[in-house]
Amino acid sequence: MANFDFLRKIPLFAELPEEDLQSLCQIVVDVHLPAGEVLFEEGSTGDKAYIVRTGEVEIIKMSQNREILLAKRGPGEVFGEIALMFDTERTASVRARVDTDLVSIGREDLRLLLKLSPTAAASLFDIMLSRLQNTQNLLKQSEKMAQLGTFTAGIAHELNNPAAAVQRSADQLNTVLFASAHTFMRMVREGLTTHQQQVLERYVRMTQERAKEMPEMDPLVRSDREAVLEEWLEAHGVEEAWDCASTLVNLNFNDGNLEELSTEFGPQQLPTIIDWLNNNYTVFNLLSELRQGAVRISGIIKALKSYTYLDQAPILRTNIHQGLDDTLIILRHKLKNDIKVRREYDPTLPEIDAHGSELNQVWTNIIDNAADALHEANTPDATITLRTRQEGQWIIVTIEDNGPGISKENLPRIFDTFFTTKPIGQGTGLGLEISYNIVVVKHKGDIRVKSEPGKTEFEIWLPKELKEED
């Protein structure tokens, strides 16, 4: 038989008695796979294992809508056995790299083989264990790179807004300063007295203070006030009265201010003085916008550095609230449009010993999953609530969302490797498994999950003190 000599060379079948191997050759099926053809898809039912006779196949998994090449299998190699033995869906797709000939064996036949041959069982166990570890390591690395790409895009988006505001304000400031210099020269020609200069200085200082924040005012009241001021300014010969009127409203000018200015400065001087105050207000306002933009950029960079704990020891004193807030900044692009975030922090919460950057990964995985669930379900009044509290030697962080919940069937499996409820290609099924290992294995803590429609709650229990293992 053509398959007899081939299968005898495969470690999985090498120790089978000749009679059993001949029986196996009667039940295996030959499969031909042209180059580029897909043998099975990720998510399909695993009912057969395969051995490559000639050619080569590639094992592919979709993650973040991109293909990840997990492995290549050549002549004599077995694949498809994991889903077969665990009776689960395929965790990856298989595609022929070149014209490939395969030998397939069904589930019951493979299980019978393992009963007949302890050597075959040991060989298959070694293969499966090695592949699970390699696949998990590769996907974890890919998950980190994909997450890094997502964060980079999000941070770029967050930085773009204040950076654009800074650039816009700087461009406008350049124009306004030129106009202000022109107005200043006009004012010099007016020959202001010492008293007039003192009055003007007082108004400039007031302008500087009030330019930091626009007064709250009903739109109709504002419109009426602007109309009255515009009429007054036009009557006193001020050009572009409409623009100056808006500024005076922002400065919260009243009739007393107008009367003082018209009394202190003559009819020829007043238009120049109003123009000077208008220019100063615009300059101070633009400087305030520049400062806000710079502060925003600095805050994002500070949060990013804190989030990754650059140049820090593996275990350090960690502020849980700071880590949660930094994570929210990193994920702001995903939350700010339609998801409200409520913080209910215990103000007395102490710092704890922890692997800070890894805890931030836990917060990221859980909050990111909550945001995805809320978006996918289009949840009305979508809300994520973060709570912290203390119980004895434990710090408890609760992350709750009001999304559709996790089904009773899926709840026991959410920490299983490769298990995901997201559509194929959207997730690797490693986020919660990684989080579980960080909390339970590395921090000697616990993660407890409760879920029902309208409320999913993750409780992360962390010890206040953590000793690093030798």
Image (tube, grey):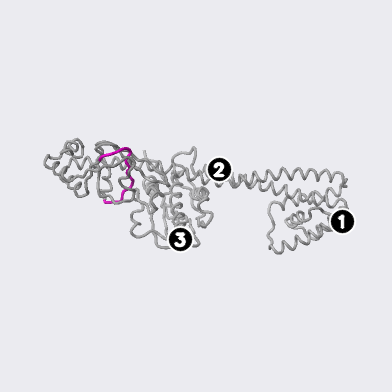
Secondary structure state at the residue bearing disc 3 = loop
Q: Which residue is mark 1?
A: 263
The structure residue drawn at horizontal position 49% and vertical position 41%, both measured from the top left corner, is 309
N-terminal of the pair, mark 3 or mark 1, is 1
**Which one is nearer the viewer's eye here, 155 or 306?**
155
- Position of 7 with respect to 184 (left or right) is left
The structure residue drawn at horizontal position 88% and vertical position 51%, both measured from the top left corner, is 268
Secondary structure state at the residue bearing disc 2 = helix
> In the rendered view, would you say 362 is above or below 253?
above
- What amino acid is at disc 3? Asn
- Marks 2 and 1 sit apart, C-alpha to C-alpha, by 51 Å
- What amino acid is at disc 2? Ile
- Marks 2 and 3 sit apart, C-alpha to C-alpha, by 31 Å
Q: Which residue is mark 2?
A: 301
The structure residue drawn at horizontal position 31% and vertical position 47%, both measured from the top left corner, is 40
Q: Which residue is mark 3?
A: 402
> Mark 1: few, some, or many residues within 10 Å (few <14, many ≥20)?
few
Residue stretch in magenta: 87-101
- What amino acid is at disc 1? Thr
